[in-house]
Structure formats: structure tokens, C-alpha cells
Image (cartoon, helix red, strand yellow):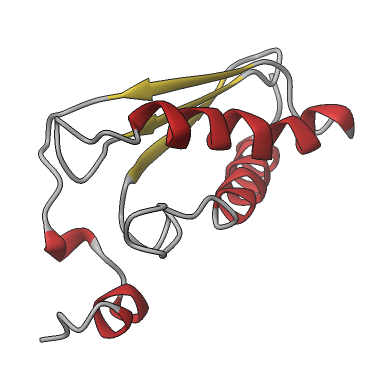
Amino acid sequence: MGTEQEIQETKDLVMAQLENVIDPELGIDIVNLGLVYDILVDAEWNVTVVMTLTSMGCPLAGVIHDQVKQTLSELQELKEIGDVDVNIVWNPPWTKDKMSRYAKIALGVAD
């Protein structure tokens, strides 16, 4: 297992890469939308992305799931990470409060 710093650097690298995954309905990346709850890294550098969607009935769930795996495959090719799993959870439920200030302004829901 890597050091805490190496694990955090890997999590940061994964999170930065996930900013390339755009929610097709909202046009904002999943990181700024607050959909990514956690990045888990195991001893073999396999990554689990713990995330949610804006609604349970999201018709584009499969598209977003595939985009996450595709985007992170670039890091796999560079041997930065191992296997990738995407764990979509519904608890805690997503709310607009989880969005970054940038996303709120872009979507016109700023406080």
C-alpha cells in the first residue's frame, strides 16, 4: 500500500480526470455538480468512484457510468491506477447544495 500522500495524490489525479465527464443534461462536469462523493484506492491502486446522480430515474445513468470508466481508462493506460469500479449510491441524496459555486452560477441557481 502506498503512503497517505501517494494515495491522496492518486485521489486528486482521479478527481481532476473526472472533471472531463460532463453531465449530458446539465452541461456541467460531475465533480462541480457534486456527484462524486468519494474516491477509494486499494493496495493494488484499483479505484472505486463512489458517486450519485441528480435523480434516481436519471435516463443517462449508463452514459455517465460509461464516461467515468472511459475517462479513467486514460489513467489506466498510463499505469497511474489499476482497475476502475463505479459505485452509484443514493444515500446521502444529491441536492443542489453539493454543487460548486461555479456550477450554481452556470446553472443560474447561485445563492
60 left or right of 43?
A: left
- Which residue is at 74% across, 30% downward? 73
- Which residue is at 60% across, 37% downward? 4
Instruction: Decide which of 74, 2 is in the foreground and name it.
Output: 74
Instruction: Decide which of 59, 75 is in the foreground and name it.
Output: 59
Image height check: is 53 above or below 43?
below
Image height check: is 103 above or below 53?
below
109 left or right of 5?
A: left
Q: Which quadrant of the figure contains the N terminus?
A: top right
Instruction: Decide which of 93, 10 is in the foreground and name it.
Output: 93
Q: How far across and how far down the image is residue 83, in percent?
A: 67, 15
Q: Which quadrant of the figure contains the C terminus?
A: bottom left
Q: How far across and how far down the image is residue 101, in percent?
A: 29, 79
Quarter of the image for residue 69 reads top right
Q: How far across and how far down the image is residue 12, in percent?
A: 60, 51
- Which residue is at 64% across, 18% downward? 46
- Which residue is at 14% across, 31% downward? 56
Q: How far across and how far down the image is residue 63, in percent?
A: 46, 33
Quarter of the image for residue 80 reads top right
Image height check: is 4 above or below 34?
above
Find the residue positioned furthest to the right. 78
Number of numbered tags placed on the structure image: 0
